[in-house]
Amino acid sequence: MHKEFLPTLSILMEAKDKLDTEIMGKTAYMIFGLNLRSFILPDKEICDSYLQNIINLTQNLLKANEHYRKYILEENLVIKEFREKNLKDSNINVNLTINPISLLTEIEGLLTQLKAGLDTLAVSLNPILGLNLNGWHTEKNRSGAKVLKSLDNLSADLKIGVKPLYNFIEKNIEWLSYIVKLRDMPIHHGGIKSIIPILYDYQTTKVFPQKIVHSQGFGDTEKIEMFLLRTIIEMTDFFHTVIVLSLQPRAHGLKVIPDIVGGIHSYSWGIPQP
């Protein structure tokens, strides 16, 4: 273990929920358990820089989850107050809606953290694969296209080793582009236009939470709460798989082998079973 990273890791260990623990286990803790200095990144300065990138993207995922927790608390409060306020007014004879800034702020903050994590993920590939990326950039509306182009320009021998990584990113590029497009909407278009506001039904006095109308091919209308949670989980798994697939071509035939000890994920190098 690198002693200079212990203070940061101690902060990361302060998991607030099960998803925090899963995020850390599949990113920072996994990497610190693989002993990269031994045979992948022997140069201490380069290895330390790589480890810091992994810590940074782990923190991006943890911050996204913090936005999710705040969103849940705030939405529950908004719904309660919105219903109580409208119940007091007997003259209401139409459905009412609200789209609180407090909720939009958490949604936008969560998506921003995921995009920041993607940028750091791209940079983390540089020392492992000899690339020169400075972010997870979009080309022709395909987020990550420049990463694929860089992988395609590797030497013939290394290109064979990174083929699983290339195929995995290619498989997910449309989904990634959709998430990044949602993140960009508040910046370039004033907000995410596909969000359905909180609705008060005056006839039933029920309040319905925010929803998002997904673009074609990305699912049906979904509660924002469910969309945010699902996206964090899926992005965590994406980061994890990209990290693993980027390391394995440099591991002399070894694979990252998962194990579960006491309900906690751990990873080590091993010989893949035929």
Image (tube, rainbow, N blue to C red):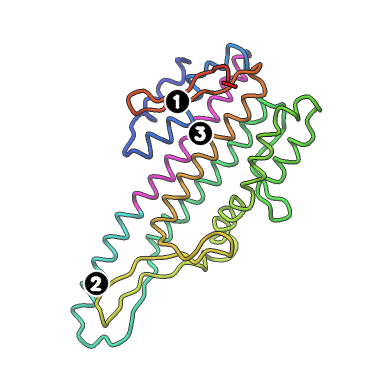
- As measured in the structure, the alpha-carbon distance from the residue carrying label 3 to the one carrying label 1 is 13 Å
Which residue lies under the disc numbered 3?
Answer: 56
Left/right placement of residue 171 relative to residue 81 reads right
Circle 3: element type: helix
Left/right placement of residue 130 relative to residue 227 reads right
Which residue lies under the disc numbered 2?
Answer: 83
As rendered, which of 271 and 204 lies closer to the eye?
A: 271
Query: Label 2 crowding class (10 Å Cα cut-off): few <14, some 14-19, many 20+?
Result: some
Query: Label 1 crowding class (10 Å Cα cut-off): few <14, some 14-19, many 20+?
Result: many
Quadrant location of residue 118?
top right
Quadrant location of residue 40?
top right
Find out whether the residues at labels 2 and 1 contact each other: C-beta distance under 8 Å: no
Closer to viewer: mark 3 or mark 1: 1
Quadrant location of residue 271?
top right
Which residue lies under the disc numbered 1?
Answer: 29
Q: Position of residue 163 (x, y in %)?
A: 71, 33
As rendered, which of 40 and 249 lies closer to the eye?
A: 249
Left/right placement of residue 266 relative to residue 39 reads left
Residue type at mark 3 is Asn
Q: Main secondary structure of the magenta part?
A: helix
Q: Is residue 82 above or below residue 91?
A: above
Q: Is residue 51 magenta?
A: yes
Q: Is residue 167 magenta?
A: no
- As measured in the structure, the alpha-carbon distance from the residue carrying label 3 to the one carrying label 2 is 40 Å
**Upstream in the sequence, badge 2 or badge 1?**
1
Q: Is residue 112 above or below residue 194?
A: above
Q: Position of residue 199 (x, y in %)?
A: 35, 73
Find out whether the residues at labels 3 and 1 contact each other: C-beta distance under 8 Å: no
Q: Which portion, as a residue range, is magenta?
A: 43-70
Residue type at mark 2 is Arg
Left/right placement of residue 130 relative to residue 3 reads right
